[in-house]
Amino acid sequence: MITMAEATHMHAVILAGGKGVRLRPYTTALPKPLVPIGDDHAVLEIVLHQLSACGFTSVTLAINHLGPLIKAFVGDGSRWGLHVDYTEERVPLSTVGPLFALRDRLPEHFVVMNGDVLTDLDFADLLHTHTLSGGALTVATAARSVGIEFGVLDLHDGRIVGFTEKPTFRYRVSMGVYGMSRRTLAPYPDGLPLGFDQLVLDLLARDEQPTSYDFTGYWVDIGQPEDYDEANRNFAELRPILLRHRQEEKV
């Protein structure tokens, strides 16, 4: 559990500046974090509620595309019991680049997440686990299976030495939610476009292996129309999972 001293410094950065190209036409008029889920909620609203319920006190929103709409919707964050501030990209900086200009405003350890993630992950436990690890980066991971719709051949010297009909491969994948330490940002100049993929490769090259936070609960990236549509169809069942703290408050 997070101690009271840690809870007073629990901060998250939400990356909400993307154009949501894969989710068009839904994102033609709305930034991706504001697309509706169910009848009453935007994705970002759910995330901010969850962070507040986990004990976070402050959030920085990295905005760009349709950023004024996000500012108008979120405001100062007080309706979630949060202090929300903003950083605005003048040019696209990918997923890590927006953090470089923030480094003096960030606590020693914090959470970074994409603004299009729906999950019941305990963000406080992720941050606590990362802090205890002493590492530069902790990646929340989920299990995913990928099926191959063909027979797969094992080849050696031009001969088939093995055969598997339509195999399924299982991987752990990044959920787009991270625990990070401020020192991780130190080697990079402000204004440098950098993605999490390159950051991980840089850390591996420096022999600083990131930590995996293995998660088994609900997670979906709504960046794909089919995933977004499925989340909407299932929201009646998902509501108690994603907004369980709100349900408890009503009891």
Image (cartoon, rainbow, N blue to C red):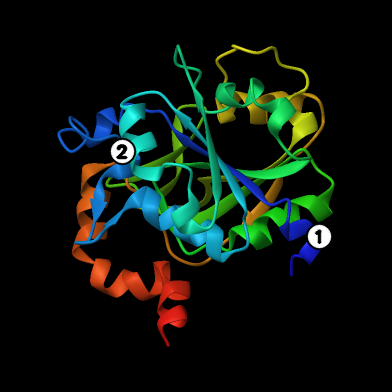
Q: Quadrant of the C terminus?
A: bottom left
Residue 113 screen position, x and y as percent: 53, 43
Decide which of 213, 75 is in the foreground and name it.
Answer: 75
Residue 114 screen position, x and y as percent: 47, 40
The residue to which callout 2 is attached is 32
Decide which of 142, 223 is in the foreground and name it.
Answer: 223
Residue 59 screen position, x and y as percent: 56, 44
Residue kind at label 2, given as amino acid type: Lys
In-image side of 184 versus 164 (left or right): right
In-image side of 92 versus 53 (left or right): left
- Other-residue count near label 1 (Cα within 10 Å), few / some / many at <14 / 14–19 / ≥20: few
Decide which of 184, 162 is in the foreground and name it.
Answer: 184
The residue to which callout 1 is attached is 5
Residue 223: quarter of image: top left
In-image side of 206 versus 44 (left or right): right
Q: Residue 248, can we see it?
A: yes
In-image side of 76 versus 151 (left or right): right
Residue 82 screen position, x and y as percent: 55, 52
